[in-house]
Image: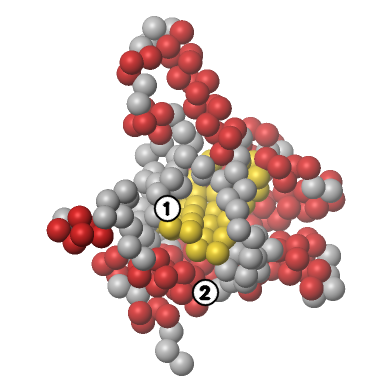
Amino acid sequence: MVSAKDKICLQKLPQHVAIIMDGNGRWALKQGKERVLGHHEGVESVREITEAAVELGIKYLTLYTFSTENWNRPKDEVDALMNLFVETIVNELDTLNKNDVSLNAIGDLKSLPPENYQRLMETIEKTSANSRMVLTLAMSYSARWEIVEAARKIAVMVSQNQLSPAEIDEHLFAGCLTTAGIPDPELVIRTSGELRVSNYLLWQVAYAEFYFTPTLWPEFKKEDFYEAIVEYQIRERRFGMTSDQLKAK
């Protein structure tokens, strides 16, 4: 069987891929299991896709791990997710270092339970020297929260005469976001068949290509990831220009 990986042009890889990992709960219900078991199975997909991204040479992978809205889920599910998070962070440290992957996190991290926050910060520190790929977890994250926080930072700078309103531009605003220093995603993948961005990286995905698949996240494996990359590579990214302008360029 020919793999989609064989169709990938390594010279045209997206530098940054962002994923909305959706469908863990529905996968579990389809199996007649508790929703939390879907999250456990979803961890296996995280391992596979991270490995696939590293093997291809993708530099940045950002995963929508837990949104601010997810705090509204049943307490038992939230508690189980937080416990799974700690367990996974501890267990994956050696693998991250082995694969030269640096862990990063964005979001309202201080809202995490203290143990989760501590484990996360420790792992980020222990992988900080790695340089093959940056794996970013969006934890307790929402794009609207992020944009408001950026606006608040700018307002403080203006109020303290560190900045004039005339100096505010897209570059400055982007530098106040939690993703400062990370290139915007060129490809956004969403699993489970839902066709929305769910408050994810709203500023950063302005020119991203979107790839929607009905596959539930626990069933999304390397071959599915390769197919998304192939689809990305056959699209024409014009950024407001015409096809003729792109060809001339």
Report if residue 101 is visible in the image. Answer: no
Q: Amino acid at mark 1?
A: Ala
Q: 166 or 242, which lies in front?
A: 242
Q: Residue at x 68, y 34 (%)?
A: 111
Nearer to us: label 1 or label 2: 1
Answer with left or right where residue 183 lies relative to residue 61.
Answer: left
Q: Disc 1 or 2, which lies upstream in sequence?
A: 1
Q: 232 or 60, which lies in front?
A: 232
Mark 2 surroundings within 10 Å by alpha-carbon count, few (fewer than 14), some (14 through 19), many (20 or more): some
Q: Position of residue 173 (x, y in %)?
A: 41, 29
Judging by the rendered image, the residue that carries numbered circle 2 is 224
Q: Position of residue 81 (x, y in %)?
A: 73, 53
Residue 97 lies in what quarter of the image?
bottom left
The scheme the figure's colours follow is: secondary structure
> In the drawing, what numbered circle is on residue 208?
1
Q: Residue at x 67, y 52 (%)?
A: 85
Q: Position of residue 2 (x, y in %)?
A: 42, 89
SS for callout 1? loop
Report if residue 173 is visible in the image. Answer: yes
Q: Amino acid at mark 2?
A: Asp
Quadrant that contains the C terminus: bottom left
Q: 50 or 86, which lies in front?
A: 50
